[in-house]
Image (cartoon, rainbow, N blue to C red):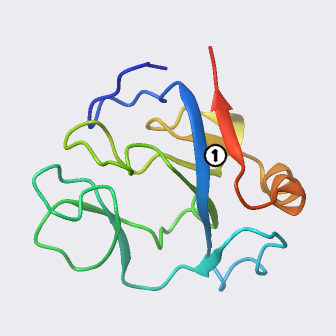
Amino acid sequence: MAALRLEGDGATPLGCFHIRQVLYRADRVARPRTRLPVRAIRNNDGWCDDPADRNYNRLIKLPSKRSAEGLKRADHLYDVVLVLGYNDRPRVKGRGSAIFAHLARPGYTPTDGCIALSLRDMLALLAQTRPGPMIVIVR
């Protein structure tokens, strides 16, 4: 965990962050029940993690000439994703990108700076969450 993150440091940022939207794999899970904005992940969806790109820390279409993470992953981590409002308003180049709450790996092994939950816990959280929520990350 870190109060001040840098791109690629693998740290989870400390602070309070709005949930901007929910992304999900419609080919793997049902549309989550929530009052938050929801969008199905498309085959060409990616997240720009290149600080030099004008779309840094934003949802983009792949392929991209810049560095970007594909959201339609082979594993199940991004079957349900909460996009957190970290470094997005305003975006500061190099301060970190793609901070999500997503599904956990077996054994809850570490993420690259995100928050990981079981599918059951993620769906329970979404069912109870209303627009305008914040996630608080503390030590």
Q: In which image quadrant can residue 78 be found?
A: bottom right
Vertical order, 98 against 59 (above or below): above
Image coords of residue 7 (percent x, y): 26, 37
Which of these two is toward me, 55 or 7? Answer: 55
* SS under mark 1: loop
Q: In which image quadrant can residue 137 be found?
A: top right
Vertical order, 14 against 51 (above or below): above
Whether residue 40 is visible, yes or no, is yes
Q: Amino acid at mark 1?
A: Arg
Image coords of residue 33 (percent x, y): 84, 73
Mark 1 lies on residue: 105
- Quadrant where the C terminus sits is top right
For the point 36% across and 70% down, which residue is it?
Answer: 46
For the point 74% across and 77% down, which residue is it?
Answer: 29
Image coords of residue 6 (percent x, y): 27, 30
For the point 43% across and 19% down, which residue is it?
Answer: 3
Vertical order, 64 against 68 (above or below): below
Image coords of residue 37 (percent x, y): 66, 73
For the point 24% across and 42% down, which residue is it?
Answer: 92
Whether residue 76 is visible, yes or no, is no
Q: For this view, does 9 lie left or right of residue 13?
A: left
Disc 1 residue crowd, few under 14, some 14–19, many 20+, Cα 10 Å? some
Which of these two is toward me, 15 or 111? Answer: 15
Q: For this view, does 47 lie left or right of residue 20?
A: left
Which of these two is toward me, 133 or 76? Answer: 133
**Number of disc labels:** 1
Q: In which image quadrant can residue 119 be found?
A: bottom right
